[in-house]
Image: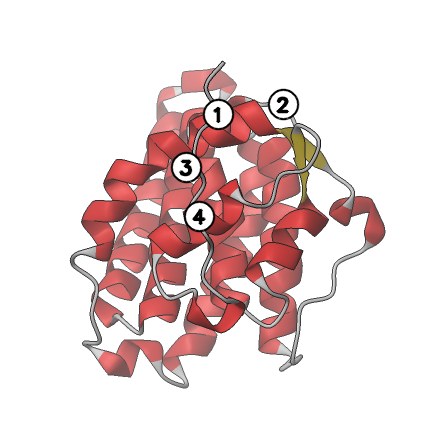
């Protein structure tokens, strides 16, 4: 069986694009599986925006259908975001989360699925609308991410819905990573759309809501 050639990952402080982050994900596997700790080692514990973006992208991918993964991902993002708000210099993660693993094959399929859209996004990100990626706007962005993380576990039985909320977090994290306020704005809009979808589902009694 042919082994895929892996791209040498950028150094921690050079993770400035989605492509860099996907490369780091591909290079984080050991013995056929990938742990949260492996990803932290590869991405770097000082890189808050990429570490927020990693689980968000995974939850946008088909991996969001794995039972329990949306809740784990949301918990992971919540803990990172809290630490960013508190001004910690680097990410701390409890051992029980660092030891969580996913099969390398499933992760690589998710990375392959994400390559095309993330390449398109990378080609269009640049520094703009900086008022939306500077204080105090960044604090509002981080608080919104926290709020979304509290919502996701309650919606885990509906993978597509968790994915649209994860897309909002992804846009917000891309804004922080690339200092691109347009993606921050897209994140706000996506979050509003996601809430609208939930309201519509509750009103219509779809997916067991409003029964």
Dot 1 or dot 2: first in sequence order is 1
Q: From this viewpoint, is residue 157 visible?
A: no
Numbered disc 2: secondary structure: loop
Q: Earlier in the sequence, mark 3 or mark 2?
A: 3
Q: Which residue is mark 3?
A: 60
Callout 1: 10 Å neighbours few (<14), some, many (20+)?
A: few
Q: Earlier in the sequence, mark 1 or mark 3?
A: 1
Quote the CA–CA distance across marks 4 and 2: 25 Å
Where residue 23 is drawn, which disc sits there?
A: 4
Residue 128 in the image: state x and y as whole percent.
Answer: 18, 76
Q: CA distance from mark 3 to mark 4?
A: 17 Å
Element type where label 1 sits in the image: loop
Please say if the residues under marks 1 and 3 sit with CB atoms less than 8 Å apart: no
Q: What label does residue 67 carry, if any?
A: 2
10 Å neighbourhood of mark 4: few (<14), some, or many (≥20)? Answer: many
According to the picture, the residue beneath numbered tag 1 turns out to be: 3
**Residue 33 is drawn in which quadrant?**
top right
Name the image quarter holding residue 113: top left
Q: CA distance from mark 1 to mark 3?
A: 26 Å
């Amino acid at each position: 069986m042919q082994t895929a050639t892996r791209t040498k990952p950028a150094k921690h402080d050079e993770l400035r694009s989605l492509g860099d982050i996907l490369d780091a994900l591909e290079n984080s596997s050991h013995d056929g599986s990938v742990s949260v700790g492996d990803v932290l080692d590869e991405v770097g514990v000082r890189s808050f925006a990429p570490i927020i973006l990693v689980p968000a992208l995974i939850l946008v991918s088909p991996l969001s259908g794995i039972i329990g993964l949306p809740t784990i991902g949301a918990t992971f993002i919540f803990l990172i975001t809290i630490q960013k708000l508190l001004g910690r210099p680097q990410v701390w993660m409890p051992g029980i989360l660092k030891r969580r693993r996913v099969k390398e094959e499933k992760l690589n399929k998710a990375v392959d699925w994400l390559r095309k859209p993330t390449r398109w996004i990378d080609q269009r990100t640049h520094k703009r609308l900086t008022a939306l990626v500077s204080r105090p706007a960044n604090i509002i962005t981080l608080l919104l991410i926290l709020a979304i993380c509290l919502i996701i576990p309650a919606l885990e039985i509906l993978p597509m819905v968790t994915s649209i909320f994860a897309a909002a977090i992804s846009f917000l994290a891309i804004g922080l990573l690339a200092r691109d306020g347009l993606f921050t704005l897209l994140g706000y809009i996506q979050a509003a759309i996601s809430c609208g979808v939930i309201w519509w589902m509750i009103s219509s009694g779809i997916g067991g809501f409003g029964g």
